[in-house]
Amino acid sequence: MSDHMTSDEFRRHGHEMIEWIARYMEEVERYPVRSRAQPGDIFRALPPAPPDTGEPFEDVMRDVERILMPGITHWQSPNFFAYFPANSSGSGILGELLSAGLGVQGMSWLTSPACTELEMRVLDWCVELLDLPRAFLSGAGTGSGAGTHAGGGVIQDSASSATLCAILAARERALDGLGGADQSGLPRGAAARKLVAYASTESHSSVLKGMRIAGFDDTQLRQIAVDDTFAMRADRLAEAIQDDTRAGRIPFFVCATVGTTSSNAMDPLAAISEVLRLTALARQAPGHASAWLHVDAAMSGTAAVCPEFRGMHNGLEHADSYCFNPHKWMFTNFDCDCFFVRDREWLVRALAIEPEYLRTGASGVVNYRDWQIPLGRRFRSLKLWFVLRHYGVRGLQRRIREHVALAQEFASWVDASAEWELLAPHPLNLVCFAHRDGNERTRAILEAVNASGGLFATHTVLGPGAAGSAGRFAIRLCVGQTYTQRSHVEAAWTAFRQAADAPAES
């Protein structure tokens, strides 16, 4: 008797699983969007030890329904307005299924040429799709070793990993310019302690985390003030760089954000690029005088599929690296971050280690293991390829425009209300708003709406208050789930107004 699932069993259970997923997608609205499980509920419901003998597939699925489903927050609900979306689609799910079935480990070209070359081509498609700088194209591939001066793209698991890789590449370039790098790529001695990085006070937490992982102290990251739109102030960046330069420190990395997590603020890429150009000229330092510019467009980058939204990328032609997440707003199942570099040499030099057991003898190829932190890598490009081929450019544009239009309509309802107000610009699909009665009232309304189970939204705090008091508590409503329609957005607005009108609990 075999312990393995037979082909016939796999076919039967596979059909059952596809049917289960299809039914879930059709019925997801019947679930409370946010899980109502209490801490420990799921853990206690699971047996403390694995089964001694194998169990029927039907029993496993029964426990999925009985134990796991009550602990699921339903990110694929059209009433999910929280955080930023992590949306999926039928084509993405099928691409993920095929990737799992093939079981490819795509760490190098030799381990699966199709895995590598499809990724190169799909990333080049994304350059065309978003009208990104042509310097990010990988072309036919000209090798992945040190000394290769060409750009290209790679799929990371998340924008956080992309930011870390950008920091490592920037550090490699800076230390090379100072003559302070070695084969380990680790920050060394006085040279590394002089390096400083910059990001706005609204930038993602992954920048500080990446700096820590790269071996830097928290004091080596400068947080730059933002303007009234919560975007980085280029003049304050220039002042910080000048101060550090006069103190003998070395600016090596700047992270600009196209669509911050709190409010979807757009950092001015062109002005930031000009600051870096002018300060590099003023330094007249040897080696690589300009700081590395990384642009994080994790959620908002997808909007550039539509030509009318590409103004947010003005100045991107000067960036050294860029990333966006198809798993947020391009209907591609998590995880899938597209990370592009202008010059792959520094990324590869920072990350490439080649023991004898990894040597392949293949020349003129890309080995993506040298473009990321882990050695192993999944066939992520397959699901993105499926999605791009299923929707096509026009299909993606239509969906993105629908989401933006719905968010803009929601913002117009808030703006027209005497009880509510907008707290930040809303260029795309995120609306930050609050009740005029203040922070505690807004917080209570959000908690009541989320407790109802009909929808899920999250919050942020925007800007400092008067005399150093806390900033404004804002409800964030992000329209980006794959199947969200106008009826869902209307229902959300009704839910917030009804919660505001309900008598307060004594």
Image (cartoon, rainbow, N blue to C red):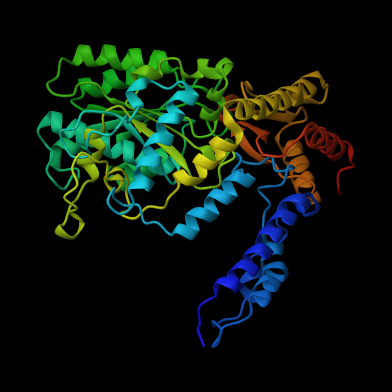
Q: Is residue 252 left or right of residue 134?
A: left
In the image, residue 380 above or below residue 244? below
Residue 287 percent coordinates (x, y)? 13, 24
- Report which quarter residue 223 is drawn in: top left
Q: Residue at x 15, y 43 (%)?
A: 188
Is any atom of residue 488 visible in this view? Answer: yes
Residue 220 percent coordinates (x, y)? 29, 36
Q: Residue at x 52, y 88 (%)?
A: 1
Residue 333 percent coordinates (x, y)? 56, 46
Which residue is more in the foreground, 345 or 44? 345
- Report which quarter residue 286 is drawn in: top left
Which residue is more in the foreground, 323 or 249? 323
Q: Residue at x 19, y 16 (%)?
A: 283
Q: Is residue 339 left or right of residue 246?
A: right
Q: Residue at x 61, y 25 (%)?
A: 394
Which residue is more in the foreground, 470 or 69? 69
